[in-house]
Image (cartoon, helix red, strand yellow):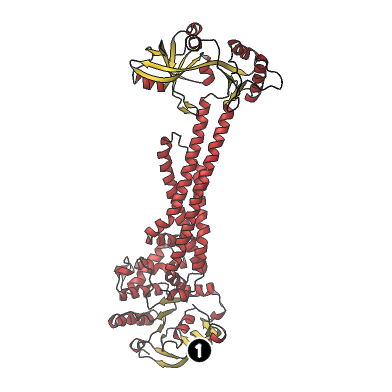
Amino acid sequence: MLGTTVILAFRAINRHKLRSFLTTLGIIIGVAAVVTMVTLGNGATAAVREQISSLGANVLQLRPGQGFGRGGGGPRPPDFKERDLTAIENQLTGVRAVAPVVQSSGTAIYEGNNWSTTVYGTTSTYSEVQQWKIADGRLFLPDEEAAGKPVCIIGNTVRTNLFQGAEPVGKRMRIKGVSCQVVGVLATRGQGGFGDQDDVVVMPIKFVQRRFTGDRDISQIMVAVDDAYDTSTVQTSLEELMRERRKIKAGDQDNFNIFDTKQISDTLTGTTTILTQIVGAVAAISLLVGGIGIMNIMLVSVTERTREIGIRLAIGAVAREVLMQFLVEAIVLSCLGGVIGLALALAASLAIAPLMQVPFLFDIKVNLIAFLFSAAIGVVFGYFPARRAAALNPIDALRHE
Amino acid sequence: MIDPIISMRGVTKVYGEGPTAFQALKGIDLDIAQGDFVAVMGPSGSGKSTTMNILGCLDVPSGGEFLFKGRHVETLDRDQRALLRRRYLGFVFQGFNLLSRTTALENVELPLLYRGEDKKTRYDLGMAALDKVGLKDWWDHTPAELSGGQQQRVAIARAIVTSPDVLLADEPTGNLDSERSVEIMQLLTDLNRNSGITVLMVTHEPDMAAFARTIVHFKDGLVERIEEGMAA
């Protein structure tokens, strides 16, 4: 009997191709919208997580001042000194690597090309902390670091804009009026949550301190936490150590802040997840509207096909068979809509993901739920018209013009 | 008369209730024998259509008894009557009532689908029925591509594809010219004689009624008289 009704449903749909297509259009758009939004949203979440992990997994960033949005007036809190770095290395447990950072900005010049960029002064341990890879060339040599020699490693954005295809390793460029030799190129890291991470020039910290900042202060200390230790525990002991070193009285606020990349990662991915859910919910409303569209057309269809129903009843169809026919028709329509919608969503996601610079993540669960939901819509919105068809009196139905 | 296939005893039918109630049938007694060819005649409002609806198990009487193959139809529910129609009855209508945009074969196969026959049986029986009405070569044409006479023959093929005991025809020639009408009547006569199908036909054309063995005249909700047709 189910086989029969499925045959009948397909025949009816086949007989009215345009109307069937228009009926199911709402479902197609609804499913496509929901699945595309959720797929792209998941991609965006993954991208954010990826970018943040590129800042370094389990890295604590120690900066002077009270962090985002706080602070306010008063004298600028002092930067860190090299002895702070040594203290962290020697007195703190659970630390994998520590790297100092001094930041400066300036223009790089190579053969008439200018490029404004950020200069990081740091040590080789920085690559360990941040898990930066060298794509080309090498890291600083110990003697280059110790002496603060004019050597640099450049990011990919600087390479493209300054060298424009030329091989940079071994060349000399000028940075803030000082000549330096390019010894390496960093592997591409992409757009991070904090701007283009490839738009950098990395130099030995001693060189930057001597030539650019003019003092021996360290503006930022990066602390990589050993995987075996809990980041928050290390963060607490780091805070205690720094309070002690900076002679902050009990009850006074810190004049430094510790930035936990993992925490930021959680916050940001949480935000994108919520956004994905909201956009998905809006798209789900269009799916509901699509369902109402199916009910609408099915009701019209029942009226229009009253005579057909009369014929079927006269021939000997029982009420249940007529009900099933229209119900199965609605379900087949909505399922077809669901499948077409999923195909559209796949195509749209594949097309849009690269434009949004997010990875395409095919989530079988989302697709399955969307499909089952469209089938459920067929059942819910197909039932009322189907029951109406089945309740028709054969004599009246046959007389219907 | 031996073992009537259809037997009506004091059948009444009332539409509506209270003062507006309309009594369409006022007590019909009618026996129809297996293998008979009955023409039902009468002016409009005489109750012949109501009687045909009850005979076709599409409607139930308000009072009296209606036995179909010994079964009290007045006690059956909607679905039980549907199953009775499916098994024993075939319908031909004035307006042909074929499914549009559906081939002749698919139309003819329809009752077999409800019987749950498999694809091959449906095809074989469907083509055999189309062959009987002389439209085997037209199996893949839709109603829009067929003439009125051809459409009615497809409708007859659909009615006989299940080898029913009784064929009910409601003004089968009403929409056809006289030449096509005669063809249809000859086809019905042929089915009655050679396949043993009991034919009940409503008509208001005496020429068509003349093909029947028995002619039942209705008037004012009662059977006025029963006469023998020319075929008797």
Residue at left offset 37%, top offset 62%: A15
Q: Position of residue A307 (x, y in %)?
A: 42, 71
The image shows residue A138, relative to residue B220, as above or below, that is above
Q: Position of residue A169 (x, y in %)?
A: 38, 14
* Nearer to me, A20 or B83: A20
Q: Is residue B64 left or right of residue A159?
A: right
Q: Position of residue A281 (x, y in %)?
A: 53, 47
Q: Residue furthest right?
A: A250
- In the rendered image, the quadrant that contains the C terminus of chain B is bottom left
Badge 1 is on which residue? B28
Q: Is residue A261 left or right of residue B201?
A: right
Residue at left offset 41%, top offset 23%: A157
Q: Is residue A175 visible?
A: yes
- Chain bearing mark 1: B
Local SS, label 1: strand
Q: Is residue A371 left or right of residue A115?
A: right
